Amino acid sequence: MEFHGRVLTVKLDDGRRFKAKTEKRKNWVDGEDGKDYRSSRHEEREGSTKAFRKVLDSQPENWQAVVSAFERIKKPSRREFGLMVGYYARRGDMNRARQTFESMRARGIDPSSYVYTSLIHAYAVGRDMEEALSCVRKMKEEGIAMSLVTYSIVVGGFAKIGNAEAADCWFKKAKERHTDLNAIIYGNIIYAYCQACNMDRAEALVREMEEEGIDAPLDIYHTMMDGYTMIGDEEKCLIIFKRLKECGFAPSVISYGCLINMYTKIGKVSKAMEVSKMMKSVGINHNMKTYSMLISGFLKLKDWTNVFAVFEDVVKDGLKPDVVLYNNIIKAFCGMGNMDRAIHMGGCIPTVHTFNALVLGLVEKRKMEKAVKMLDKMALAGVSPDEHTYTTIMHGYAALGDTGKAFEYFTKLRNEGLQLDVFTYEALLKACCKSGRMQSALAVTREMNAQKIPRNTFVYNILIDGWARRGDVWEAADLMQQMKQEGVQPDIHTYTSFINACCKAGDMLRATKTMEEMEAAGVKPNVKTYTTLIHGWANASLQEKALSCFEEMKLAGLKPDKAVYHCLMTSLLSRATVAEAYIYSGILSICREMIEFELTVDMGTAVHWSKCLRKIERIGGELTQTLQKTFPPDWNAHHSLDADYESDINDERSIHGDNDMFLAGVNDGDSDEEGDDRHGSKGYNQRPWA
């Protein structure tokens, strides 16, 4: 036909096209020959869905492959969205999990309990429990009930951030809503209390679980062993290991790893090596974690030879050293002072963690210029410093009392948008307290309060020690009271710092009461605590009390170190002109102990002590002969008891100066004592930046 001058061809429909469409729709609804009818679009979607699930199962570590497979699904269903949210949850990728969740809702698909639980899991893994609880509230608003899995994830999330109280609250809610609990939720709440070092409550929960007829899986035994490791209870840890075997479980590499970890934490590395041999004898090979534990143990002992011996075993076993292991080897080279080799090792794996290990090594050697230059090397390697890098440098300047530099790198950290945490503020406080700027320290604590960062035991220790340096016992006592009000538990370093404050203020009555309070709280005094108290009694000219405290320390099973003998002997010799028998016998007794332990003093100390001896025995006698056995081997060749008086005065000043320096560092926030699992053996060595 012709239309407006153009020829058009018209095809008449006899109804077959419409009939075919109707037939296809009917086949899709009813199925054909007893089978589901699949259109080409439907088959294409099903194929892409199967491909996505296959990639998800076979290549979960390949993030790009999983995302690409998901994007090839033209119209994902609730199930596919849920799987993708769950995938991001396992990776702790909160942002992408939320983005996928919102994309699903934008398509008009309502989330199910499973999808909500997956999103909550993402926030729990990412340690953002505030957002996780926000999702829980949203679930309730939409009338979606929380499953036992949801409760378990919330309990586990609070356990990971160390909030045992909140974890227990949600555990109780789960018991109210669900009568039949399982081993998973029990494992999460037990883990929460183990992390909080409340092993009595953890034991009670294990018993409760068994009474409910729920068999404890192997993981719970490992959790309990880790809990006892954190509180240093070797006996209980071994009992759990024995019970594990009695219940029919074959110890795995994780089981033996728990024992190795426990022994390395308490400093019994030889025992850890025995466990290693036992493990090999039953046919269980080491993995990277167990080898890293052994290396960490030898690092604490500064046993560099065994560190490298274990590293050789790693290579012999055909294991590929990871970043953690290389970082430990770098620490070993740093500890040996071989910084060139450490930097060469760092070139193998140029990651931020490797550079952080190098920075830490340089900071510990007080080589701050080289530590700062590492920032330039990081920039050349295309590696950006993180908060741990800057915080480590801040701690280095803090140890030197350089408040200006510490604040300079704090400003850089903040300007680069990095996370400010309690460890960062600890470095600032340490710098302020080292330099005696306590008003600045108070300003830092106010800033912490504004940022809603709670003060932990280490923060209080630094502040108390700062006031102790100034002998301000009232400020120190006020901080002790604040700790109790905030529920922060004082540790051995807290009590020792406060005792130091009391001793410097001359308040020996309060110092003695603090010792009693400490023991009543279950905190045992260590050598530094007794040394501080002995020095306090000596400064108060109560040498008899100092000797009594010294004997009490030995009765407590503690071995006196060189500093204790130095402090006590100097104190007794300063009072040697007072003709009291206990001073004379005390000097002889301490001399004999020093000779027995083969302890010798430096030349300056020998000169000072010899001057004090002249006041007692001008021509030499039993005291002189005994005391000189603690002097340096070249004493007789270079010095005599008739040393120049002027020189002696100068030496006396230097000796007292050294003693004051030692006591000022008794509790400087950097303790040499073994702390909990988080803080390591020397102050901040087990911080995340270590």
Image (tube, grey):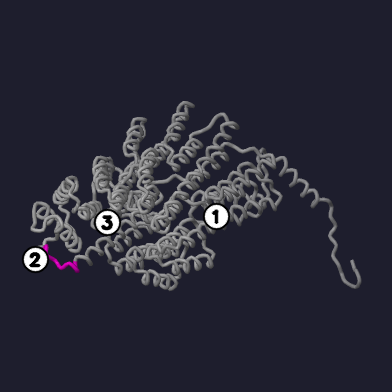
Q: CA distance from mark 1 to mark 3?
A: 39 Å
Image quarter for residue 255?
top left
- Three-letter residue code for mark 3: Lys
Residue at image location 67% in from the left, 47% down from the top = 38
Label whose residue precedes the other's in the sequence (3 or 2): 3
Instruction: Relative to 79, say whether 599 is above or below.
Output: below
Q: CA distance from mark 2 to mark 1?
A: 62 Å
Check disc 2 and report its element: helix, strand or loop.
helix
- Three-letter residue code for mark 1: Asn
Residue 21 position, x and y percent, is 77, 49
Disc 2 residue crowd, few under 14, some 14–19, many 20+, Cα 10 Å: few
User: In the depicted view, which residue is nearer to us: 401 or 287?
Assistant: 401
Q: Which residues are magenta?
A: 639-647
The residue that label 3 is drawn on is 302
User: In the depicted view, which residue is nearer to us: 297 or 399?
Assistant: 399
Dots 2 and 1: beta carbons under 8 Å?
no
Q: Which mark is residue 449?
A: 1
Residue 657 position, x and y percent, is 28, 62
Residue at image location 36% in from the left, 44% down from the top = 509
